[in-house]
Image (cartoon, rainbow, N blue to C red):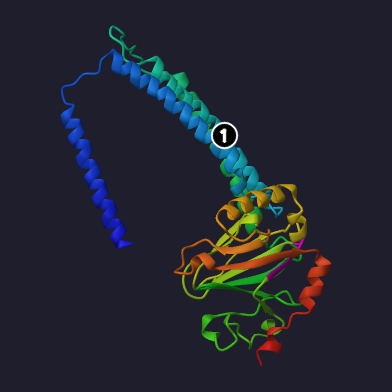
Amino acid sequence: MLALFYIFIFVAVGVSIWQITRILNFRGSIANDKDNAAQAKNALYFMVFLYAIMIYSLLALNVIMLPEAASMEGEHDDNLFNITFWVIGIVQFIMQFLIFWFTYKYKGEKGKKAKFYADSHKLELIWTVTPALVLVVLIGYGLWQWNNVMDISSEEDPLVIEVYSQQFRWDARYAGKDNTLGLGNVNFIKGINTMGVDMSDKNAQDDIQVTELYLPKGRKVHFKFRSQDVLHSAYMPHFRAQMNCVPGMVTEFGFTPKYTTEEMRQNPEVIAKTRGINKIRKEKGEDPYEFDYLLLCNKICGASHYNMQMKIVVVEEDEFNEWIGKQPTLAEVIK
């Protein structure tokens, strides 16, 4: 990494010297009408190229975008993204056109004199008030959505799950029949007690430790996160959820799964994207991809960060109850 940094500095210095040399060589030269006309046409050509790249990215690369949100709270994240994308996109398309068109229209010509235009209070009011109003709406919507995700105490009966991170794996612990997690601390890590659960706490006796998450459709899930070693980030992209896992503290959020894994696999949008992804994987000689929900680490936490993931299966509540009923409790495992 240090070698790459030195290479970057060397290249940057070299490019800077080269640019300074070019500037000194052109000192005293004056662009004529022919030069200005050529550069103005080049600006239009570049504008066409830029628009082509933007349109290609929007259409052809859409296959790598996430499908529809799989949580009820994630719908609002998508709304925020779409509103922001369209606002910025429309402004981008208009402003890029104006920049390059004005470069062409008002190119330097002999005898043409620029008009001096001091200011316009009306224009300044428009371009100050308009962005301010847009930001108020977006930030207000964002704060409401943040509270929607973080205000878990208002739910009557959320499913409580602790997600525990360590280099380079995830473990999860369900709160059991009492829906209350037992205390946990790294000081209690010993043998098969890999999550550091305090087994003297009565609330820990019915807790259930797993390496694969099962979630019930339509029920709010209250996630609590801990880290054993370094900073990790629990990222569940299809549910539009992410939270840092910080050593020495508990972080949390909640969401409500909207589609089971099987329903998501039958979603036309997911089917189309899966075909597109498999086309790319086939060209690379990789195995076919089958859709699954995943919990990923979104912080570079070490050498095997890329492989730190856990499978998430969303099922109907009856199937979830049947599955959870078959899992051994910590009291049965840790004796």
Judging depth in this view, the residue of 310 and 148 nearest the camera is 310
Percent across and percent down for residue 322 are: 82, 74
Q: Residues within 10 Å of mark 1 (few under 14, many from 20)?
A: few
User: Does residue 215 show up magenta in the picture?
Assistant: yes
Does the image show residue 136? no
Magenta span: 213-219
Q: Position of residue 4 (x, y in %)?
A: 31, 58
Residue at 68%, 53% in the rendered image: 73
Coordinates of residue 148 in the picture (x, y in percent)? 66, 54
Q: Secondary structure at mark 1?
A: helix
Q: Is residue 141 above or below residue 329?
A: above
57 vs 195: above or below: above
Residue found 33% across the figure and 13% down from its top: 116
Left or right for 80, reference 38: right
From the viewer's perspective, is 141 left or right of 121?
Answer: right
What is the three-letter code of the residue carrying label 1? Val
Residue lying at 77% horizontally and 61% vertically, measured from the top left: 217
Residue situated furthest top in the rendering: 111
* Image spot of residue 154 (x, y percent): 71, 60
Residue beneath the point at 74% across and 60% down: 261
Residue that lies at the very extreme toward the right in this rendered image:
318
